[in-house]
Each structure stands twice: as structure tokens, then as C-alpha cells.
Image (cartoon, rainbow, N blue to C red):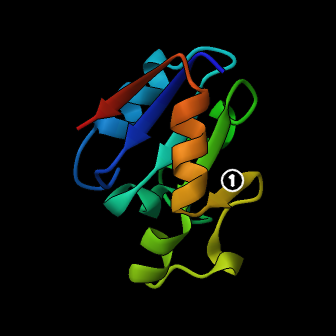
Amino acid sequence: MSTLHTVNKSAYERNALQGCLDHVLPGDAILLIEDGVYAARKGGSIASAVAAAKGSCKIYALGPDLAARGVVAAQVMEGIETVDYAGFVDLAAGATRVCAWL
């Protein structure tokens, strides 16, 4: 994996996720954290853009942040992997660089 992109803002309030999607490269990974996890939900207005990105990069969502916002596993789009804090650390440690989209 080249770059781990973290997105912590809701795609429904800010354009951080769209900016990330515009710059992500094949082999990169995106980790949705904090309010960014709302983009992992099925059927949202950003769902098609997220689904398209899954073809070239892996997308993850932080499980504790999903739970804190009442998003259950059945609501998460197929192909988005849920990770815990240890998984977050593993993703960051395995990346060449980390880019936080604010």
C-alpha cells in the first residue's frame, strides 16, 4: 500500500472525501474515521463515488466510530472492511505515508 488516506469529516457537510477520491491512486487505502464513517452507509448520496473507488483502492471504516454513530454492520456497504483501533495502527504502520483529509 502506498498511502493511507484518513477522512474524518462527513461527506454530507464537507468535501474532504470527494477531494480524497479525486486524488487516491491504485494501491492506496482510505480509512473513514469519526464523522467520515457516514460515507460507509449503503444508499447515501456519496455511495456511488465510494463504490467506484473500491475498484482501485481498499476502503475501511473504524468500527468504534461506526458504533458511536449508531451505524450497524448491516448498514455498511459491501466491500468496506471494518477495523478496530489495532487495525488502524496496522494500516498506518503498513503505509508508506499517511494523508489526513480535513
Locate residue 100 relative to residue 62 in the image: left or right. Answer: left
Which image quadrant is residue 38 in? Answer: bottom left
| Coordinates of residue 101 in the picture (x, y in percent) | 30, 33
Left or right: where 74 falls relative to 25: right
Residue drawn 63% across and 43% down? 59
In which quadrant is the C terminus drawn? top left
Residue 92: x and y in percent read 51, 35
Q: Of the residues shown, which amino acid type is indicated by label 1? A: Ile
x, y percent for residue 31: 51, 44
Comparing 99 with 70, the one in front is 99
Q: In x, y percent, where is residue 32?
A: 47, 50
Q: Is residue 78 visible?
A: yes
Horizontally, residue 12 falls left or right of residue 78, namely left
Location of residue 60 with respect to 73 vertically, above or below: above
Numbered circles on residues, count: 1
**Residue at the image point whose x is 28% and y is 51% from the top:** 9
Quarter of the picture containing the N terminus is: top right
Looking at the image, is 71 positioned above or below residue 16? Answer: below
Q: Is residue 49 visible?
A: no
Residue position for label 1: 80
Look at 68% across and 61% down and name the residue there: 77
